[in-house]
């Protein structure tokens, strides 16, 4: 395999600044959801907005519930909002988010075909790792998101997301690239894009993980319009 990951190539860069994410989220919600689902999502978002269960909400600009296709077969879970996400109220729209968009692009997956969220919905101060108690306080929201989206595959980016879903403390170096089964879903652990920005040497491992993700989505025939026709 070529060491050069395709998502680091200039040609795959998507100009996310030109993407009107808020509009597309609203359109997805109104066009793709049954009426009962609209109210369930509205309730969830209202619950997140009103939540004061941990101290993280005291220093934020916006809650960041998550966004994307509410019926997506693939759900991507990160750690917690960063500065740009806190300012915009949207998950993965800063530098790490731009890298995530390029990573998805590298496997032919448009970003608006997945649902993206974090383990905590409020930005931890100075982007520190969320405390276990904060992750625990926010877990019912993540659990509800999984119930509503009903994804078949989870991509767990970074240790906090992996630990939250798999229920165990893991080493990313040892666990990345490994598939787990949880509650009828397949879950793949990989590096967090922020970690890849800090240490680009790991991009080649992340590229292996992405190819494994694409193969699994193909095997499960989850995105026939992207990966079919299947023989
Ligand atoms: N890092 C995350 O884990 N989530 C975001 O939304 C942005 C950066």
Image (cartoon, rainbow, N blue to C red):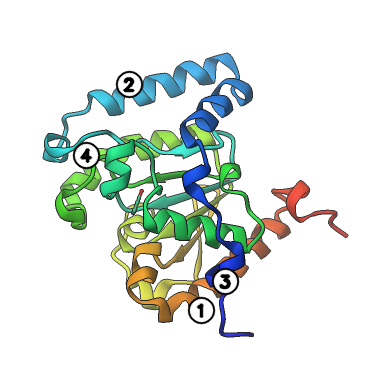
Q: Which mark is residue 106?
A: none
The residue at the point 41 percent across, 38 percent down is 66
Circle 1 packing at 10 Å, graded few (<14), some (14-19), many (20+), is: some
How far is disc 4 from disc 2 in space, using C-alphas?
16 Å
Image position of 141 with respect to 11: above or below: above
Residue 28 rendering spot, x and y as whole percentages = 57, 29
Residue 230 rendering spot, x and y as whole percentages = 84, 56
Front-lying residue, 115 or 140 = 115
Helix, strand or loop at mark 2: helix
Q: Earlier in the sequence, mark 1 or mark 4?
A: 4
Determine which residue is flagged by label 3.
Answer: 9
Mark 2 or 1: the one toward you: 1
Circle 3 packing at 10 Å, graded few (<14), some (14-19), many (20+), is: few
Residue 216, image quadrant: bottom right
Determine which residue is flagged by label 1.
Answer: 204
Mark 1 or 4: the one toward you: 1
Q: Earlier in the sequence, mark 2 or mark 1?
A: 2
């Amino acid at each position: 395999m070529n060491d050069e990951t395709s998502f680091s190539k200039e040609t795959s860069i998507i100009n996310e600044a030109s993407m009107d994410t808020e509009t597309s989220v609203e359109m997805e919600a109104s066009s793709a959801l049954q009426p009962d689902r609209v109210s369930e999502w509205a309730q969830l978002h209202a619950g997140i907005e009103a939540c004061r269960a941990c101290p993280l909400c005291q220093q934020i600009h916006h809650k960041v519930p998550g966004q994307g296709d509410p019926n997506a077969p693939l759900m991507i879970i990160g750690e917690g909002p960063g500065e740009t996400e806190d300012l915009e109220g949207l998950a993965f729209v800063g530098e790490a988010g731009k890298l995530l968009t390029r990573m998805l692009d590298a496997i032919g997956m448009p970003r608006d075909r997945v649902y993206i969220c974090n383990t905590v919905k409020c930005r931890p101060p100075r982007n520190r790792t969320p405390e276990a108690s904060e992750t625990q306080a926010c877990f019912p929201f993540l659990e509800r998101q999984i119930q509503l989206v009903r994804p078949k595959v989870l991509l767990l980016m970074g240790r906090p997301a992996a630990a939250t879903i798999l229920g165990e403390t893991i080493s990313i170096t040892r666990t990345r690239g490994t598939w787990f089964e949880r509650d009828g879903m397949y879950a793949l652990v990989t590096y967090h894009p922020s970690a890849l920005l800090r240490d680009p040497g790991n991009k080649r491992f992340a590229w292996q993980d992405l190819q494994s993700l694409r193969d699994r989505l193909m095997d499960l025939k989850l995105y026939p319009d992207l990966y079919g026709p299947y023989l």
